[in-house]
Amino acid sequence: MRIAMFDQMENPGVSLGEFYRNHLKMIQTADSAGFWCYFKSEHHVSPLDVAPSTNVWLTVVAHATTSIRIGSLVYLLPFHHPLRLVEEVAILDHLSGGRVEMGVGRGIAPPEHQMWHLDAAKARQTYTESLVVMRAAMALEGDDRLSLDTANWSFDHVPIEIRPLQRPHPPIWYPGNLAHAAEMGFNTVVGGSAEVAPSAVAAFRKMRAESAVRLDVEPSIGGAIRVYLAENEADAVATARRSWTPFAARISRVFAEAGITELPNDPAAGGDFDAAVGRGLVLAGTPQQLSDRLRQLAAAGIDPAILNFSWGDLSHDDVMGSLRLFIEAVMPAAVRFGEAA
C-alpha cells in the first residue's frame, strides 16, 4: 500500500512564515520516510487554506524534497486559465523530475466562486471545457499547435512551447464522483471508512468495466482519513476532539457567510466529532488502531492511503509527534498491505 499525505494548509494561529517553514519540515519528514505522494487542496478566500496558489507552494515543496511525488487535490479549474495552468504544471513537472500528480475538479463551495465574480452555475461546464483544452495542449508532440473550439474557449494554431515531462500528461485524479472518474479513467479518492470502502471499490470497478476508456493500467482508488496518533487512545481522542471544532468552523465559514447551512459531502460532519469518527472521516487513536484500519482498506482494494496529519488547531509539535509515531510504528507494515491481493 502506498502512503500519501494530504494537506489543506490550515493555520493553527502562528505567523505565516513560521507556518510555511513548519509544513516544509513535515513534508521533508514524510519524504525521508518514503511517503509516496504529497497532495494539496485548493481553496480561496477561506481560512481553510493559507497557500491558495497551489503551484507556488508545490514548487517550493519540489525543491525541498527528493523523491516524494507532489500533486494537487484538486486544481479548481474554473479559477484558472487552462493554458496558464498547462504551463505551470509543465514547469513543475520538469523542476520535480516528473513527480507531478494532477488532481482536477470544479470545487464544492459556490461562495468561493461568487467572491471571485465567477458564475458557480457554470462551474461544471467550465471544468469540462478547461480539462479538454488542457489534455489536448499537454498531449501535443513536436511542432504541433493547439487548434480547438469550445463554448468558452477558442484557440487557433497556438504554440504550446512548454509540455510536461510525463507524457502525455501527469496522472489525473478526480475525487468525489466515482461515476465521472470511472467513465474518464481517472484515479479517484473515497473516504477512509472500512465499512464503505468495499462497496465503493466494487462500484468503481464495475463502472470502469462499462467505460469506453481502455487503459493499460487501471486507475487507483485512494482512501482519505484525517488522523491523530498518540501512545494512549484517550489522549489521542481528547486532542483530536478539541481540534475538530476549529476545523469544522473553518470549513463551514465561507458557506455560513453566504447563508448556506448544509455543506455538500460535509467532511466535518457538521462539527460532530463522534459522527465523523463513526463515518471514518477521522481516526484518533493508537498506531495499532490506524494499522488495523489501513489493513482493512488495503484488503478492500484501496491504494494509496491518503492521510491528513495537520488539521484544525493541532500544533506543529502535535503534528510531528503523530507523524513520527506513524512512521515508526505503522508505516513499516502498512507499505506491505495488499501485496498478496
Image: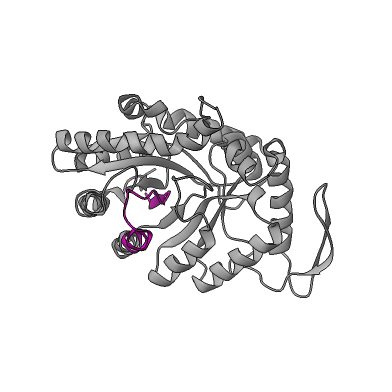
The residue lying toward the viewer, choosing from 21 and 158, is 21
The residue lying toward the viewer, choosing from 148 and 289, is 148
Residue drawn 62% across the image and 65% down it:
167
- Report x, y in % for residue 15: 34, 58
* Above or below, comparing residue 99 to residue 217 in the picture: below
- Report x, y in % for residue 101: 52, 57
Queried whether the magenta region covers residue 6, the answer comes back as yes
In the image: residue 14, left or right of residue 132? left
Residue 106 visible somewhere in the drawing? no
Name which quarter of the figure residue 82 lies in. bottom right
Name which quarter of the figure residue 16 lies in. bottom left
Q: What is the magenta range? A: 1-23
Queried whether the magenta region covers residue 335, the answer comes back as no
Residue 23 visible somewhere in the drawing? yes
Q: Which residue is outermost to the left?
A: 232
Residue drawn 40% across the image and 67% down it:
67
Residue drawn 72% across the image and 62% down it:
137
Residue drawn 39% across the image and 57% down it:
36
Q: How many marks?
A: 0
- Report x, y in % for residue 170: 58, 60
- Report x, y in % for residue 264: 53, 30
Which colouring convention does the figure follow?
one colour
In the image: residue 256, left or right of residue 10? right
Q: Quadrant of the C terminus?
A: top left
* Above or below, comparing residue 129 to residue 68 in the picture: above
